[in-house]
Every structure is written in structure tokens, then in C-alpha cells.
Amino acid sequence: MTPPSETMQASKEVQLWVGPQHPGIPGNMSMQIWVEGDTIKRGITHVGYLHRAFEKLIERRNFYQTFPLVCRICVPEPDTNEYLLAAAIEELAGISDQIPERAQWIRTLVMELSRLGALLMVVGGQAGGVGLGAAPNWMVALRDYVLDLFEELTGGRVYHMYIIYGGVRRDLPEGFEARVEEVLEKIEERLPTIDNLIFESAVFRKRTMGVGVIPKEWADQTALTGPVVRGMGIPRDVRKDYPYLKYPELDFDVVTEDGSDIYARALVRRREIDQAIDLIRQILAKMPKDGPVSTRTGNMLRWQVPAGQTYVRAEATRGEFGYFIVTDGTDKIRRFHVRGPSYVHGVSLLERMLPGLNISDMYPLMGSLQVCPPEIER
Amino acid sequence: MEKIVNELESRFGLLSHREQRADLGEVCIRAEKTVNVLEWLKNHTGYVHLTHFSVVDWLEENEFQLTYLVTDPDAHHTLMVSARIDREKAEAESIHALWPEAVTYEQEFNEMYGIAFPGSPRQGVEFLLEGWNAMPPMRRDFDTVEYCNETYEFRPGRVHVDPKEVRMKFQAEQKRLAEEQKQREEATANSNEPEPQP
């Protein structure tokens, strides 16, 4: 007969499935956790609810047909995908140096507008994770102004397919710069109120300060990137470390915070909103006022790219986003493999951080790691 | 890049190497030396980050290419360490002891390419698929259309609409109506003719 003490031990742990339909889960994924009381003992990330086989589909498409697929890999910030695909194929096709100056500036502008929109959403979502319901609504309303700009520029609010091989699809509309400035002013006007609502809130501070602390030695052990590593006081940013587009010509410092907790990561993202606004203004001021926005690439439907292999990277709001691409000289990509920051942050790092965490802190933690399931599944 | 290539050449022997960009290079090694090379890079050089890990299916050559992207965060340089394994005996040494996040990659490649990483946790555990019993789907000889035709049924009641067929039906109907009209007109014309007098 089992001793009573062991039976008690066995019944102490409860296994829970959280998600994919759960307000605290960031997207279509689920967590299998074992809890004792309200303390998590261990957990496993489960993905696959959103697997659309983009990597397989792209192996069967010609080069031009890949754009509508890649932008769907990340919903809040699709332009990083478009840029990376274009940059990788341009490099393998040997036309990287032929991208017009104005096209490169417009690409940089699009990347920063996209970053601004994504940051507004995630900072609000972070506050929503601890019960501050007004913040995400206000932030998403501000993000909508950025989406209005994208709608005017590209015709699409969420998925743009604007950055293409050789440059961008079309030039900026007349008066676009002024409308960008209007939107920036509207956002700046609201930010102090939002700061009061989120960062001065006792609820937010108590729920996030000293919670979800990542030990510094993990930064190199698991190759952490983005606000996760910058919240640990480590100035690591692809825009500075591996300069691309026009970032070397822009004046900015890498934003860091020392807390290494959820609050520090939220603060990094909040300060990066200011940084993105500043960078957009710098881009608009430094951008050449006219010139071509794409180079002649011939009929892209008939492209055949020489055999090669490369890895390109860019700084997304979540961290280092990379594309590993192999071509074999035909009209299709041989291998297309996405390196999304959530692949590390949302699986191995999250599972490593869960033991000992209070169950109610799991949602703010996932929000602070900015886990994005589509880039885990691709 | 040159220094690290010379070191690797003298210690492990390289099959080839090349520089893709100033911040990206590639070295090709024999598969049996993979773990030794990566371990040396991690413990004795600055290449401490496993930035990415990928597989390429070279079906025509009956080989899988495993590429490990390791990065030196201080020198801002990434090295693609590539090795090829036999496609028929798809098995490679696990690197999860070097980088814990490699477990996820190895779990995914086991599921998607059928490559075994003995000793790696979560081998055979479902990652993205559920109840999959066909060929690993990322292999290049996996035919998605054939799999769908064999596995799934078209929903009953779905109406097949081919614009060409619709057009042909419309044209046939028009032709039929025109002929009927013509026959009616002829019949009317015949009925109006005066009957022959006896």
C-alpha cells in the first residue's frame, strides 16, 4: 500500500493546459505547466496551432511569389521579413550595390515606422497582461495612426509587400512626410499620459519589478537578443553591431536598462518608442528628396538566382530576426529558414524561467519576452 | 576570418571555406568532426552564440547539409559551419550539451526531415505536427499535392465552377434558343401562307 505521505506528494502537483484560447497567451500557442499551489514547477511550450508551412511553400514558388508569404510570418511587424528576403536575394543575385539611395532611405523609414507600430502594440499589451485594460486600447489606437500611414503608402494596413527586390514598389505619396510628422506629434502628445498610466502605476510596478529576472550569464548561454538582452544592461543591437540600410548614418544610442526584470524590458521598449520617433525624424530630414526608388531587375517572374548561401539579419522589436537562404541556380529558393527571436525566447528561455514562478506572473513574463508563435512555426 | 580558418584547418582539417561578407564566413567540415569543431569554437574562441541551426536537403546528391551558425558577439562575426550527412542514414551528433536551445532545433529537424540526433531530449516528441504518419514533410521528395489528394476528401456539395465550362454552357444555350426562335419563325411563316385551293 502506498504510504499516505507519498500519496499526498503525488496529489500536490496539478497539470494545467493554458491556451491556445486564453487572454494571457500571446498568440496561438499553449503552455503545459505543472503547478504546486500557485507556484509553477515546470512547463513546456506547445506550438503548431498556426503552422502554415511557409518554408515548404516558398521552396515551390518563384522568387517574386514569395513576398505575400513572408510578410505573414510576423503580423505586428511584417516589414522586417520583406526587407530580409529582399536583402538576402539581392546579395545572392549580386545586385546589393545597385539599390538606389532613396530606396534605401525609404526602406529604413518603413522599418522604423513598422517598429514604432509594433512597439506601441507590445507596450500596451504588456500593461494589459497585469490587468491595466485601458493601456492596450489607447496604444492600439495610436498604432492605428501608423497603420493609416502604411495604408496610404502601400495599400495595405497590416501586410504591405512594399519592399521588393531592387528597391521599393513605389515612391512616397505627395505630402507623406508632413503626414508622418502629424502622426508622430499625435503619438508624442499622448505618451506622457500613457507613461502615467503604465510606468507610474503601483500595480504595474509591483507586478513587474523584480519579477522574471534573467541571470546575466544566460545572455551568452542562450544567445539572447533584443529588448530581452538590453534589459539586462547589455548593449546588443543588430542596427549597431551589423549595420545595414542607412542606420550607420543615423545618430542613436542603444537603449539599455539594468533591472533584467519585466519592468526593465518594458522600459527599454518604452524608450525605444522615443528612439523610433527620433529616428523617423532623422530619416525624413536626411533622405534625398528625389531619385529612383528601384533598380531595373528585368522580369522577376523569370528570375534565376546563382547558387549560393547566406544569412542576413535585422533588428526587430523582439530581437535579432534572421533569414538563412540557400539558392541552387534555379528559379526557386532551395532552402528558406527563418530565425525568429521567439524560437529562443519563447521555447528554451521561457521553459527555463518558469520553475518557481507564480502562475499569475507567467502572462506578464511571456509578454515581456514578446513571444510571437508564427515565427516559431513558420 | 583568416586566423580562425587557419586554426580550424590545422586542428580539424577543412573541406573548404569561403567568405560571404565581412561579417559572415563559411567553413565546411566532415560530419564526424562537427561536435569537436563546435566545442572548440565555443570554449576556445569568441564564437559562443548559436545564432541559428539549419538543414538543407540535397535530394539529388542524397545528402543532408547541416549548417550551424555560430557568432562571436564581440567581433560581430558569424561563421557558418557546414557538414553533410548521408540522407539514407540520417543521423547526426547532438549539440544540446553545448547550447541548450539546440534541443528545439533538433526536435524540429527530427520531425520535419527525419534526422535523428541520438541522446537529444525530445526526439520523437511532436513539435509542430500532430499524429503525422507520412514521410517527414520538409524532405524535398514529399509531394504536398499528392499527400492532400490521398489524405483529404473534397467536401461534398462543393460546386465546381470553371469559367470556361460556364461560357460554353452559355453559348450552347444561346445557340439552342436562337434555333428554337428560328424554328418558331419558320413555323409562323408557314402557317401564314394561304392554303392551296382544291
Image (cartoon, grey):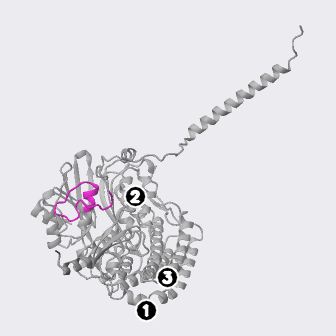
In the rendered image of this protein, does residue A227 appear above or below residue B187?
A: below
Which comes sooner in the sequence, label 1 or label 2? 2
Q: Which residue is mark 3?
A: A135
* Residue drawn at point x = 50 percent, y = 88 percent: A192
Q: Report the span colored magenta.
A: B107-130
The amino acid marked with disc number 3 is: Ala
Residue A339 placement: quadrant: bottom left
In the foreground, B22 or A224: A224
Decide which of tag 2 and tag 3 comes sooner along the chain. Answer: 2
The residue that mark 1 highlights is A202
Residue drawn at 55 percent across, 63 percent down: A155
The dominant secondary structure in magenta is: loop
**Residue A52, label in figure:** 2
Residue A61 to residue A109: above or below:
above
Circle 3 Cα neighbour tier, 10 Å, few/some/many (<14 / 14–19 / ≥20): many
Tell me which numbered mark, 1 or 3, is placed earlier along the sequence: 3
Indicate yes or no whether the magenta region holds residue B115. Answer: yes
Q: Secondary structure at mark 2?
A: loop
- Residue type beneath disc 2: Arg
Q: Is residue A254 visible?
A: no
Distance (Cα) linking label 2 and label 3? 32 Å
Marks 1/3 in contact by CB < 8 Å: the verdict is no
